[in-house]
Image (spheres, rainbow, N blue to C red):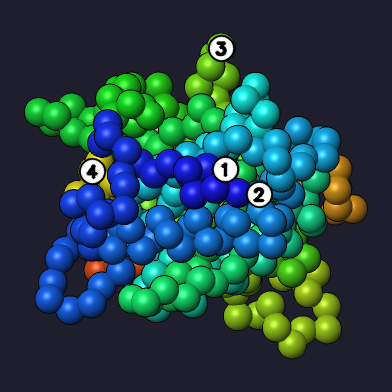
Amino acid sequence: MQSRLFRFFISGEEKEIFPGSRLWKFALSGKNTEDFVLTIGDYFSAARQFLLKNDVALLKSGLESVFNAPVQTDQISKIVVFLEKHGALYHPLKIQVAVSESQTCSFVLNGAVSNPGLSLIGNEHDLISRLNQAYSKHYLPRVFGIDFIKTDNGRVGFFLGEWFDGYKEFHVTENQDRRQIVIWEADGSCHYILETDALDIYQEISRILTYYYDLETFEQIFPWHHAAGDFIVRQEGGSTHVRLITVRGYASLTEFADGEADKKVHILPSLMFFFLNLTLRMRLDRLNGTGKTVMLGEGVIKATIEGFLKGLDEKSTAYDFGDLRSVFIEFFWQFKLEQIIGIMENILESCHPESSEINLLEQHLESHCRILQSIFKNL
């Protein structure tokens, strides 16, 4: 396979990036120093090495999964690599593959270069793979393999995964005290919708996180954050579709989950802890993803509850615990406002929000709990 099989671009730049060009030599971090640092060219070269390894075995595995048919190496006519963005831990690449000049397919190549990212990437690949095998519905990307590439200026970890076509990142934004949700289009433009019109997005996120909550082991996807772009959305034909693109952790957050002979007595208390934490986290975002931490409006609380209860309806068919929606609502009714606030305060202590988030959550904690209690009284 010849080197011109590959073409390299940076999203937002019209021209192709070649070895020797200014951007090829630019630091991946965006900060050039006198020290040896990993360059954009180093990163592209490492990605090419990863994709070519073992006769493009991982790429063919992904293509065969998409097309549901065998793919030969000589059928791959072009591989276009786009450097999409720079996250706190990963530098995602979009990989567009042309097969036999007639079909194209896109993948994501998540790459880590920092020590925190390199420490996480293998675990994340394995967690996504595990959850895809354990759950019949797939809201996570399929993953096709992981490897680590050595370069002259550092080590890069990559894993290849499914690219969700048509899905976009979204965040809360403010303009002259008007709160809206901005959906970022692929061409760099923005689509604005009122926060009240975006409630279906938050309801679906709540349902998905509840879907992946394990009632018997209390394991859950955590941490997650809107500001990090963990969830992406596609809206079409009046329907809202949401996908989760990362899993940084999957474990129980409740201390009484370990060392108990009969964990069934803790199913509802653990579920309560999960639910209350969910309602708080759902309301947190940063303006435009990177700005000031803000709390989303009160309508998000009701959307979160509706998504959670829909998730319980799905679980009622998989677990022999009866009508989980009714059981949980009756369980919630047992708690007075002061008790709910107390549990919420324990959540803040145990889940370690950032300092900017803690201050904001503490300001809204009592009103948040009052709204929760009011909604449940009417269920």
Residue under label 3: 237
**Residue visible at 57% across and 19% down?**
239
Left/right placement of residue 297 relative to residue 103 reads: left
**Residue visible at 73% across and 62% down?**
130
Label 3: how many residues lie within 10 Å, few (<14), some (14-19) or many (20+)?
few
Mark 2 or 1, closer to the camera: 2
Residue under label 2: 59
The reply to whether discs 2 and 1 touch (Cβ–Cβ < 8 Å) is yes
Left/right placement of residue 295 relative to residue 283 reads: left
Mark 1 or 3, closer to the camera: 1
* Callout 3 secondary element: loop
Pick out the residue farthest to the bottom: 259
* Res. 167 in view: yes
The amino acid type of the residue labelled 2 equals Leu
Label 2: how many residues lie within 10 Å, few (<14), some (14-19) or many (20+)?
many
Q: Position of residue 210 (x, y in %)?
A: 64, 49
Task: Give the distance between the C-alpha atoms of the residues marked 4 and 2, in whole angstroms.
Answer: 36 Å
Judging depth in this view, the residue of 181 and 196 nearest the camera is 181
* Callout 4 secondary element: helix
Image quadrant assignment for residue 122: bottom right
Tell me the tag on residue 107: 1
**Residue visible at 18% across and 33% down?**
174
Residue under label 4: 287
Judging depth in this view, the residue of 337 and 255 nearest the camera is 255
Pick out the residue farthest to the top: 237
Q: Where is residue 6 in the image (x, y as percent from the top left)?
A: 48, 44
